[in-house]
Amino acid sequence: MKEVLIMSIRYWYDQTNQKLIVQHCASRKTKVIKSPVKIDRFCKAQGITLDECKQVQSGEDRLGMFNRPWKLWKW
């Protein structure tokens, strides 16, 4: 059985620029999500609403944004 590592992330929604910023806690790498469809997918995976993202939130990298050897779709 393959062991899956859960990565800690912080994320918040920038209302001014209408984008979601996701930061990997260990490496401090940052990814920006601009597409409303991808933002909605991220929120559903985290189990939150966009209104809750207006403040900095902590969570797990449930979509594997920071540990993929391949890209399912470009972030």
Image (cartoon, grey):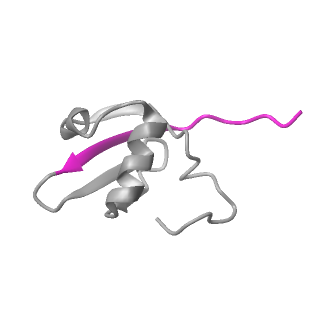
| Residue 10 included in the magenta stretch of the image | yes
The magenta-colored residue range is 1-14
Give the residue displayed 14% in from the left and 52% down from the top. 15
Residue beneath the point at 43% across and 41% down: 25
Q: Is residue 75 magenta?
A: no
Residue at 54% from the left image edge and 52% from the top image edge: 65
Q: What percent of the width, then of the height, locates residue 31?
A: 40, 59
Taking depth in this image into account, of 52 and 22 the one nearest to the observer is 52
Q: Is residue 28 left or right of residue 60?
A: left
Looking at the image, can residue 71 be seen?
Answer: yes
Q: Residue furthest left?
A: 16
Front residue of this view, candidates 47 and 3: 47
Query: Looking at the rendering, in which quadrant would you find the N terminus?
Result: top right
Compared to residue 49, the image places residue 31 above or below, namely below
- Residue lying at the far right in this picture: please name it: 1
Q: Is residue 52 left or right of residue 32?
A: left
Give the x, y percent position of residue 69: 69, 61
Number of numbered discs on residues: 0
Residue 37 position, x and y percent, is 38, 57
Left or right of 13 in this view: 60: right
Task: Tell me which residue sits at (84%, 37%) in the image.
Answer: 2
